[in-house]
Image (cartoon, grey):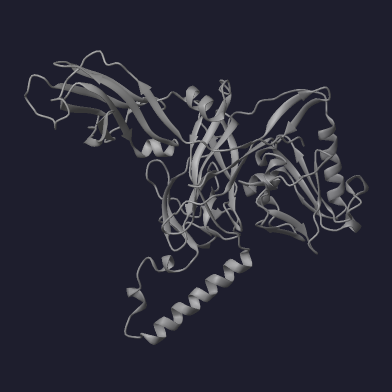
């Protein structure tokens, strides 16, 4: 599996413009502004975001003479991004604009030089550079193309004050490459180190595609989350990191919290349990997610299964559509939602220690298309599935056929492995990988896709094959029952996936 890595450093921009305004105004020499005098001028303009084609409402502006920086005039743009400075003496001025949107783009401020002349009005626009210029500015001249993208954000600690932290961010994605041996699946990735403020830029991502992203700082990490880079190539997303803990540690913390709550109740018996604050879950160092699941028309959906990646905890929504996931690892993780007759859904969530995140989910019905019949010669993949049926009759191993996989409606590949006997799925402390898959005894199995042995090489297991492409699965949890064609020198057993349509 080919990989490539590019490490980018972060540069924060001050976007500057030098404009000789077509109109001028003046202010009494170097005196304070005087309204209504004939020797004064006016400066008007607009603050505009080219990346969204929208004005920057409520942007903060400061104006100062270039020869007297100590004198500062300030104003705030209106809802259309427009601003006005009255009664300006003639001369050259420096205007600067700040806005939270600029912060998210890594731009300190927009600055502009403007000349004010007597009796006229100067007008100019302070504009965020268009996306192609931004990408070239951050990633190098000539980097931008129709298929290239960039991710910008800040890494924060998953604690209430959400302070930024220096960290490393990795983004990876799947792509097909045409080689002399035919089409090959590759998993390239890019890494970026944040600056001192936690700001990061990941260059050279694909645009209009899905990337798998993870951030880490020392022993803290986010989970792997799938994010979509827009067609315009610019993705803005902060990432949260928290301690990497095992499911056993999470369960132990939850039990300790429940015991502490029970002791508190016993010591204060006059307080009825029903008076316990609704946010009691927010009093412990773990995180929680609560919310509702509904159809687009507002109908509540019960018995929808919800889980968070990097945690084995799973709950079902109540008849009124409500749910609560507690004792969750903190950081940015993936909320997975699935139900019978519903299209599976995955979404990133930021879980902060001591807080309860509230989400409202809309689930669409799964739409089954009319079958399309294609005639072709039988490939080795089909022959492999015939072998699957033969091996299953031998009663060795663990098998899932197309109907069983469809019934489980998996969102992630690991959803198919959690119930397999002898297979252990645990969140990995290795920031470069996803969930760790091990057999009894802790050894790592060998993976096969359509009969071809594949090595993870530190990659996320989800990069092996797209879960919706899996047609059948075989699991051999020890070497003694592994068929010869799937045996390896490691002697740990094998996990075999067959791809293709399940119908």
Residue 356: x percent and y percent? 42, 59
Residue 247: x percent and y percent? 62, 64
Asked which quadrant contains residue 280, the reply is bottom left
Q: Nearer the viewer, residue 350 or 255?
A: 350
Residue 235 visible in this rendered orientation of the protein: yes
Whether residue 31 is situated above or below residue 156 in the rendered picture: above
Residue 23 relative to residue 246: left or right: left
Q: Quadrant of the C terminus?
A: top right
Q: Quadrant of the N terminus?
A: top right
Residue 154 relative to residue 275: left or right: right
Residue 173: x percent and y percent? 64, 36
Which residue appears at 38% of the width and 41% of the height?
297
Q: Nearer the viewer, residue 381 or 414?
A: 414
Residue 57 relative to residue 51: left or right: left
Residue 233 visible in this rendered orientation of the protein: no
Residue 236: x percent and y percent? 47, 37
């Amino acid at each position: 599996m080919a990989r490539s890595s590019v490490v980018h450093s972060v540069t924060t921009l001050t976007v500057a413009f030098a404009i000789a305004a077509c109109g001028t105004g003046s202010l009494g020499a170097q005196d304070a502004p005087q309204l209504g005098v004939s020797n004064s001028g006016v400066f008007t303009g607009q603050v505009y975001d080219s990346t969204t084609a929208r004005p920057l409402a409520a942007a903060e502006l400061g104006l100062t003479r270039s020869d007297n920086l100590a004198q500062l005039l300030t104003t705030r743009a209106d809802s259309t991004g427009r601003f006005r400075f009255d009664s300006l003496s003639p001369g050259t001025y420096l205007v600067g604009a700040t806005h939270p949107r600029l912060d998210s783009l890594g731009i300190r401020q927009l600055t502009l030089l403007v000349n004010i002349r007597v009796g006229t009005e100067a007008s100019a626009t302070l504009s965020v550079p268009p996306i192609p210029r931004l990408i070239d500015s951050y990633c190098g001249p000539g980097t931008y193309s129709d298929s290239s993208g960039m991710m910008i954000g800040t890494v924060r600690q998953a604690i209430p004050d959400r302070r930024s932290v220096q960290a490393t961010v990795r983004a990876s994605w799947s792509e097909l490459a045409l080689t002399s041996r035919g089409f090959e699946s590759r998993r390239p990735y890019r890494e970026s180190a944040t600056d001192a403020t936690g700001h990061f830029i990941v260059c050279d991502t694909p645009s209009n595609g899905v990337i798998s992203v993870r951030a880490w700082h020392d022993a803290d990490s986010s989970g792997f989350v799938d994010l979509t880079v827009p067609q315009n190539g610019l993705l803005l997303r902060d990432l949260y990191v928290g301690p990497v803990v095992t499911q056993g540690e999470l369960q132990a913390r939850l039990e300790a919290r429940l015991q502490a709550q029970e002791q508190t109740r016993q010591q204060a018996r006059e307080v009825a349990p029903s008076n316990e604050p609704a946010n009691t879950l927010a009093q412990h160092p773990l995180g929680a997610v609560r919310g509702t699941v509904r159809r687009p028309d507002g109908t509540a959906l019960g018995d929808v299964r919800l889980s968070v990646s990097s945690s084995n905890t799973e709950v079902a929504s109540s008849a009124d559509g409500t749910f609560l996931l507690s004792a969750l690892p903190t950081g940015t993780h993936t909320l997975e939602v699935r139900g019978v007759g519903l299209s599976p859904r995955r979404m990133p969530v930021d879980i902060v220690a001591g807080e309860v995140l509230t989400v409202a989910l809309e689930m669409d019905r799964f739409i089954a298309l009319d079958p399309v019949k294609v005639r072709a010669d039988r490939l080795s993949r089909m022959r492999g599935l015939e072998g699957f049926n033969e091996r299953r009759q031998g009663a060795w191993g663990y098998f899932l056929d197309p109907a069983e996989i469809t019934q489980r409606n998996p969102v992630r590949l690991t959803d198919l492995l959690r119930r397999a006997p002898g297979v252990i799925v645990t969140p990995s402390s290795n920031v470069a990988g996803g969930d760790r898959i091990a057999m009894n005894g802790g050894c790592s199995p060998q993976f096969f896709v359509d009969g071809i042995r594949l090595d993870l090489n530190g990659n996320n297991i989800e990069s092996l094959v797209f879960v919706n492409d899996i047609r059948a699965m075989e699991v051999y949890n020890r070497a003694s029952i592994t068929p010869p064609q799937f045996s390896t020198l490691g002697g740990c057993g094998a996990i075999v996936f067959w791809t293709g349509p399940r119908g």
